[in-house]
Image: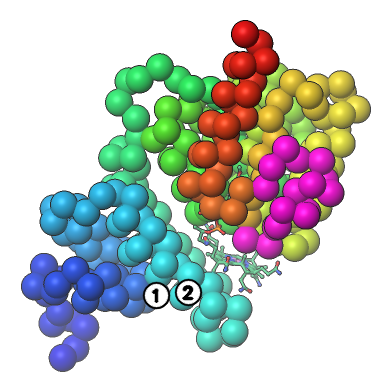
């Protein structure tokens, strides 16, 4: 059967998720939006739709990009389809008026335009009750520093997806130290090429493997901060 003939709503959950991985791979935005809506209508939790249908699909795209099977234009289409799915989930993951747990400034570092993971972290943090100020992509150190001061944030989150841009996180942390403001903020870092050792080496408070870990880590640090102020 040709792809055009597949009626998403007639697939069972498992088939639909696999089809969504294919559709994400092919950058089919409307099909991804439809798939997300169908899974939600079937009672799926927004977080499960996000991780099992979208993030898992993007992992396949990532592997084929790495292996030279997919190229930038195709990956861009996949990223756009992923973002369209995330846009439907965002309000569902977002919180409903409970008091804010803390404030985070987040951005992708200078030289790096990857923003899907960063957006996901922002969405999940908002869903957990944090106020999030998103600086977008390609941020020089000045932009981080200015936003931290302006927003009176508790947490700085930095994202990097390239081995060539991840060292820039140290530039930001070192500048914070020079300005005597490092200890005023919790610094969390994340992105596919990072690891715990790197996080420690550059002087971050923690490396976060994924968005769920980022939320839990932020909550733990905020609880410690409040305890130490009490
Ligand atoms: Co790019 N790219 N890309 N890319 N891209 C990677 C990162 C790469 C690993 C692909 C590969 O070769 N396998 C590779 C980097 C290799 C390396 O550095 N060693 C790569 C490359 C080489 C490039 C270009 C240089 C390609 C080129 O032009 N020749 C170029 C660079 C442009 C630039 O930034 N200057 C480029 C461009 C692009 C696109 C524009 C086409 C597109 C980005 C679109 C967009 O973001 N709007 C793109 C994409 C989509 C990818 C892959 C396929 C997918 C990334 C993604 O969105 N993953 C990626 C392959 C891969 O990562 N396996 C790849 C899904 C997302 C949910 O996961 O971002 O890891 P992730 O985020 C996770 C965690 O890491 C963590 O939580 C998130 C959610 O769980 N996390 C944080 C992330 N940030 C955090 C911040 C935190 C906490 C946790 O703060 C507290």
Q: Is residue 141 visible?
A: yes
Q: Give left or right: position of 104 versus 32.
A: right
In the image, which residues are magenta? 192-207
Is residue 205 rendered magenta in the image? Answer: yes
Residue at (72%, 38%) from the top-left corner? 205
Residue lying farthest to the top in this orientation: 230
Q: Do the numbered discs 2 and 1 sit on residues whose CB atoms are within 8 Å?
A: yes
Badge 1: residue crowd in 10 Å (few <14, some 14–19, many ≥20): many
Residue identified by numbered label 1: 25
Across and down, in percent, residue 211 comes to 51, 48
Q: Is residue 84 visible?
A: no
Q: From the viewer's side, name the closer residue of 218 and 156.
A: 218
* Res 217 → quadrant: top right
Mark number for residue 61?
2
Across and down, in percent, residue 47 comes to 34, 50
Report helix, strand or loop for mark 1: helix
Badge 2: residue crowd in 10 Å (few <14, some 14–19, many ≥20): many
* Res 83 → quadrant: bottom left
Q: From the viewer's side, name the closer residue of 115 and 170.
A: 170
């Amino acid at each position: 059967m040709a792809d055009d003939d597949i009626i998403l709503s007639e697939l069972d959950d498992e088939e639909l998720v696999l089809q969504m991985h294919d559709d994400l791979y092919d950058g089919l935005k409307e099909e991804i939006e439809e798939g997300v809506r169908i899974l939600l209508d079937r009672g799926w939790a927004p977080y499960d739709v996000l991780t099992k249908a979208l993030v898992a699909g993007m992992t396949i795209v990532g592997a084929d990009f790495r292996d030279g099977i997919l190229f930038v234009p195709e990956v861009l289409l996949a990223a756009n389809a992923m973002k369209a799915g995330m846009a439907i989930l965002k309000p569902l993951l977002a919180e409903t008026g409970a008091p804010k747990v803390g404030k985070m400034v987040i951005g992708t570092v200078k030289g790096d335009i990857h923003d899907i993971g960063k957006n996901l972290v922002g969405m999940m943090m908002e869903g957990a009750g944090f106020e999030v100020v998103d600086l977008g992509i390609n941020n020089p150190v000045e932009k981080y520093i200015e936003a931290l001061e302006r927003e009176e944030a508790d947490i700085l989150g930095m994202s990097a997806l390239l081995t060539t841009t991840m060292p820039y996180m140290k530039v930001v942390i070192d500048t914070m130290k020079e300005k005597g403001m490092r200890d005023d903020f919790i610094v969390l870092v994340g992105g596919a090429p990072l690891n715990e050792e790197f996080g420690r080496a550059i002087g971050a408070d923690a490396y976060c493997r994924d968005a769920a870990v980022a939320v839990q880590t932020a909550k733990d640090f905020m609880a410690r901060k409040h305890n130490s102020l009490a």
